[in-house]
């Protein structure tokens, strides 16, 4: 066989091996979501790739048969074609006993290097750069090869299935996307510039609705402004003036006996018409939606949508009112730090690079995002920053009591009775191996 024919055969084998390598890596690396989008856009080959990914046994059998056959043929053709020529060159410099072995090793090294570079590395890197496009381009020839080698595929694939069944290994590819993977994709999109900073935060807040519960967003019991059935018109007017909310609960004697709520717009209409009003007026008091305090914010949205209500009364397991929550509270969580609020309304105010003033009712999720803390101890037991410091101290804190946690000092600076109004959070550096998890002001128990 002439050197020209041998080189031509080697080139053909390299092309075949490059095709199989490119097909292998592209079909394995193609993303299911992207393929489904291409399928909806009318790309029929995307459906074929999805089918191969779901049942990859026959495909990989064809690839391995082809790659191994090409590798063997490359050695068979390349060694006798190149060894004589390499020996002829080396004879000019060396004619010892090792000449034949050195010539063989040289031809083996050249053929192997060419196959590694042009038949393996370059095709795979090319396929990894655009796996979906490469997969849909190569899938039809691979299906032709699968039909062509069907007897061999059936034999080897049957053996592999038998071993998989014997060892109890999975044989079908399953695509399960976890929340962590979605967060990772969003972070990658934000870093690549595909997602704007605001879009990234908004999407993160959407997922946060499932992990945050009603107490973290509701107006707590002690902050609820409500009317009693025996309140006079003047009392009602004064409460509306002092507390310009859009809705007010109506109770019978005490806050746990809720009869409904009134909309301040209804009161305003009557005042503008010069009419007198009473809580006993028909149509003024609306029936309330009651929800348990164990719901997450996504469930609250679903419940409000189903009942066509935008205000709900939050009740605990003892049938006591613990707060109220409105659609505005939920959307406020959704918008998060995208909303611009005055400093006095913000729950987190940054003083400088290493210190913050935080409201005691600040939800833990917002604290974690601000301070970049990944996890709190026993996060199921509380929802707010005040709950965190009480859990860590195991008591109601006094002014200047503090907790050291995750490179931060949480110090109570404003206490009103048993209510923690404000905390000062400062960043510090310490040796975590010997730093205390919590600390109180000396002498206070």
Image (cartoon, rainbow, N blue to C red):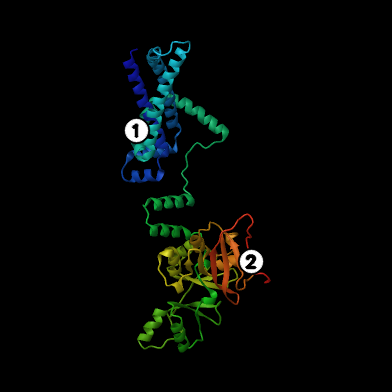
Quadrant that contains the N terminus: top left
Q: Residues within 10 Å of mark 1 (few under 14, many from 20)?
A: some
Q: Which residue is mark 2?
A: 393
Q: x, y percentage for residue 275?
A: 38, 88
101 shown above or below 240: above
Separation of marks 2 and 1 at Cα, in angstroms: 66 Å
Helix, strand or loop at mark 2: helix
Residue furthest front as drawn: 93
Identify the residue shown where x is 43% and y is 52%: 187
Q: Which disc, if any, is residue 124?
A: none
- The answer, for residue 82, to whether it is visible in the render is yes
First in sequence: mark 2 vs mark 1: 1
Q: Residues within 10 Å of mark 2 (few under 14, many from 20)?
A: some
Mark nearer the viewer, 2 or 1 = 2
User: Horizontally, is 328 left or right of 408 in the view?
Assistant: left
For label 1, the SS is: helix
The C terminus: image quadrant:
bottom right
- Asked if residue 327 lies left or right of residue 444, the reply is left
Q: Is residue 22 visible?
A: no
Give the quarter of the image for residue 110: top left
Which percent across, then down, holds residue 154?
45, 26
The vertical placement of 276 against 209, above or below, is below
- Residue 410 location, quadrant: bottom right
Along the viewing direction, whichever of 238 and 314 lies nearer the viewer: 238
Residue at image mark 1: 140
Q: Is residue 148 found left or right of 248 in the rendered image?
A: left
Q: Quadrant of residue 274?
A: bottom left
Instruction: Give the residue at x 32% y 41%.
Output: 43
Image marks 2 and 1: residues in contact by CB distance under 8 Å: no
């Amino acid at each position: 066989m002439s050197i020209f024919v041998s080189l031509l055969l080697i080139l053909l084998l390299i092309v075949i091996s490059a095709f199989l390598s490119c097909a292998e890596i592209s079909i394995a690396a193609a993303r299911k979501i992207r393929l489904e989008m291409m399928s909806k856009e009318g790309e029929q080959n995307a459906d074929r790739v999805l089918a191969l990914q779901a049942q990859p046994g026959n495909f990989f059998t064809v690839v391995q048969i082809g790659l191994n056959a090409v590798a063997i043929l490359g050695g068979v053709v390349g060694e006798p074609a190149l060894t004589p020529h390499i020996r002829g060159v080396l004879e000019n410099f060396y004619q010892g006993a090792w000449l034949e072995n050195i010539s063989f090793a040289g031809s083996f090294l050249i053929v192997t290097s060419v196959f590694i570079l042009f038949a393996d590395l370059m095709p795979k890197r090319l396929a990894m750069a655009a796996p979906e496009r490469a997969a849909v381009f190569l899938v039809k020839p691979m299906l032709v090869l699968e039909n062509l080698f069907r007897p061999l595929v059936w034999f080897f694939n049957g053996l592999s299935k038998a071993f998989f069944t014997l060892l109890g290994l999975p044989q079908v590819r399953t695509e399960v996307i976890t929340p962590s993977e979605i967060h990772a994709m969003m972070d990658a999109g934000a870093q690549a510039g595909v997602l704007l900073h605001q879009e990234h935060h908004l999407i993160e807040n959407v997922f946060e609705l499932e992990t945050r519960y009603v107490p973290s967003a509701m107006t707590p019991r002690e902050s609820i402004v409500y009317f009693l059935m025996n309140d006079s018109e003047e009392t009602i007017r004064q409460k509306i003036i002092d507390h310009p909310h859009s809705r007010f609960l109506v109770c019978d004697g005490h806050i746990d006996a809720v009869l409904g709520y009134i909309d301040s717009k209804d009161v305003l209409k009557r005042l503008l018409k010069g009419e007198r009003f009473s809580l006993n007026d028909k149509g003024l008091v609306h029936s309330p939606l009651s929800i348990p305090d164990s719901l997450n914010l996504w469930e609250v949205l679903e419940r409000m949508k189903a009942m066509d209500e935008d205000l709900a009364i939050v009740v605990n397991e003892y049938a006591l009112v613990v707060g109220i929550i409105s659609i505005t509270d939920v959307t406020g969580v959704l918008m998060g730090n995208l909303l611009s609020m005055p400093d006095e309304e913000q729950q987190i105010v940054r003083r400088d690079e290493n210190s913050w003033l935080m409201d005691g009712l600040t939800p833990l999720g917002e604290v974690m995002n601000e301070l970049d803390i990944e996890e709190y101890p026993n996060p199921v037991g509380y929802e707010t920053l005040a709950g965190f410091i009480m859990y860590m101290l195991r008591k109601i804190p006094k002014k200047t009591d503090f907790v050291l946690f995750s490179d931060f000092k949480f110090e109570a600076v404003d206490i009103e009775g048993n209510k923690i109004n404000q905390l000062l959070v400062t960043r510090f550096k310490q040796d975590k191996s010997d730093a205390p998890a919590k600390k109180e002001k000396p002498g206070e128990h």
